[in-house]
């Protein structure tokens, strides 16, 4: 009887350790992408539509950021003023995401004389952390 209890206890410990390892492994199988928007007064009235691989992932308002998970591999990121019809014209950046890493993308709005420009730009973690201090998280649901 003692041997059976010892065996069951040992099996429970092994299975528990395996479950914790699986949970930790699944967290490192993805990459995180932060989209950050702090465009000032110009263009602040409307949410910017954000795309990952031509799929809308959120509409981000001014002074906000959102966090998204992506599978490892190469992904295209873009942003536009509104709608989904003009996404083919949006400027894209490509990032090859690695599992367990975090990437930061700033949404840049430039006012021009005849045309405004809106695009994504990857920034360093240090630059992002400075910016994130003044932004609020947006769930983009």
Image: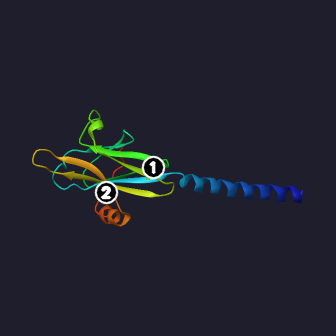
Q: Position of residue 38 (x, y in %)?
A: 25, 56
Label disc, if present, on residue 136 of the rendered structure: 2
SS category of the residue bearing label 2: strand
First in residue order: circle 1 vs circle 2: 1
Task: Please state if 12 lies on the left or on the right of 76 as rendered.
Answer: right
The residue nearer to you, when weighing 10 against 94, is 94
Q: Residues within 10 Å of mark 1 (few under 14, many from 20)?
A: few
Check the image and report above or below for 99 versus 125.
Answer: above
Q: Which mark is residue 100?
A: none
Q: Is residue 107 left or right of residue 34?
A: left
Element type where label 1 sits in the image:
strand
- Does residue 88 appear left or right of residue 75 in this picture? left
Quadrant for the N terminus, please. Answer: bottom right
The mark lying in front, picked from 1 and 2, is: 1
Quarter in which the C terminus is drawn: top left
Q: Nearer the viewer, residue 3 or 17?
A: 17
Residue 37, given in percent of the width and then of the height, sits at 27, 54
In percent of width and height, residue 128 lies at 34, 62
Q: In the rendered view, would you say 12 is above or below 80?
A: below
**Circle 1/circle 2 CB separation < 8 Å:** no
Q: Which residue is mark 1?
A: 69
Residue at figure coordinates x 54%, y 55% from the top left: 28
């Amino acid at each position: 009887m003692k041997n059976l209890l010892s065996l069951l206890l040992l099996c429970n410990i092994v299975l528990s350790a395996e479950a914790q390892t699986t949970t930790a492994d699944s967290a490192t199988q993805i990459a995180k992408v932060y989209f950050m928007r702090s465009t000032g007064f110009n263009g602040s009235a409307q949410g910017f539509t954000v795309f990952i691989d031509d799929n809308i992932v959120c509409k981000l308002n001014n002074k906000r950021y959102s966090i998204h998970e992506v599978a490892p591999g190469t992904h295209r990121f873009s942003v536009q003023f509104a709608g989904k019809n003009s996404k083919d014209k949006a400027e894209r950046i490509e990032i090859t995401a690695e599992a367990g890493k975090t990437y930061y993308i700033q949404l840049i709005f430039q006012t021009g004389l005849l045309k405004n420009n809106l695009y994504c730009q990857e920034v360093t973690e240090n630059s992002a952390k400075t910016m994130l201090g003044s932004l609020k998280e947006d769930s983009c649901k």
